[in-house]
Amino acid sequence: MIILTAAALGISAGQTRSAAAIALVAALIGITFAVAAITSPGPVSILAFVYAVLGFNGGLMLFVLGLFANARLRRATRVSH
């Protein structure tokens, strides 16, 4: 579930097409994990943080691949006279 949520965040941040928004969301993932680790009474799994980072990067990559595929399909279906 962490990976899917982070991937959705990556896709959503990519749709803004703003480097500042992408960096902000990435920083907020790290800040949220740090606050949870500080306030948690028990041990914190670093693996969950790694999953979140990988999911975010995967979502960004999926968005970029979708843009690339969309551009290729538009170019392929364009009819020249």
Image (cartoon, rainbow, N blue to C red):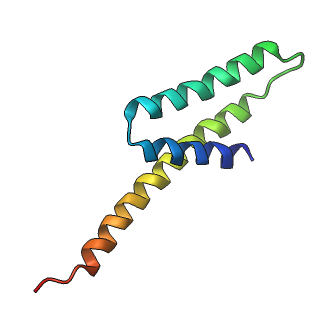
Q: Position of residue 46 (x, y in %)?
A: 72, 28
Q: Does residue 44 appear to the left or right of 19 in the view shown?
A: right
Say if 58 sits above or below 18 in the image: below
Q: Residue at 43% of width from left, 42% of height from top?
A: 16
Q: Residue at 76% of width from left, 21% of height from top?
A: 36
Say if 26 sits above or below 35 in the image: below
Q: Residue furthest left?
A: 81
Residue 45 figure quarter: top right
Residue closer to the observer: 30 or 14:
14
Q: Position of residue 37 (x, y in %)?
A: 76, 18
The image shows a total of numbered marks equal to 0
Q: Residue at 30% of width from left, 72% of height from top?
A: 74
Q: Does residue 81 appear to the left or right of 13 in the view shown?
A: left
Q: Residue furthest right?
A: 41
Q: Residue at 49% of width from left, 55% of height from top?
A: 62
Q: Position of residue 64 (x, y in %)?
A: 41, 53
Q: Position of residue 53 (x, y in %)?
A: 59, 36
Q: Quadrant of the C terminus?
A: bottom left
Q: Does residue 44 appear to the left or right of 65 in the view shown?
A: right
Q: Residue furthest top?
A: 38
Residue 65 figure quarter: bottom left
Say if 9 sits above or below 39 in the image: below
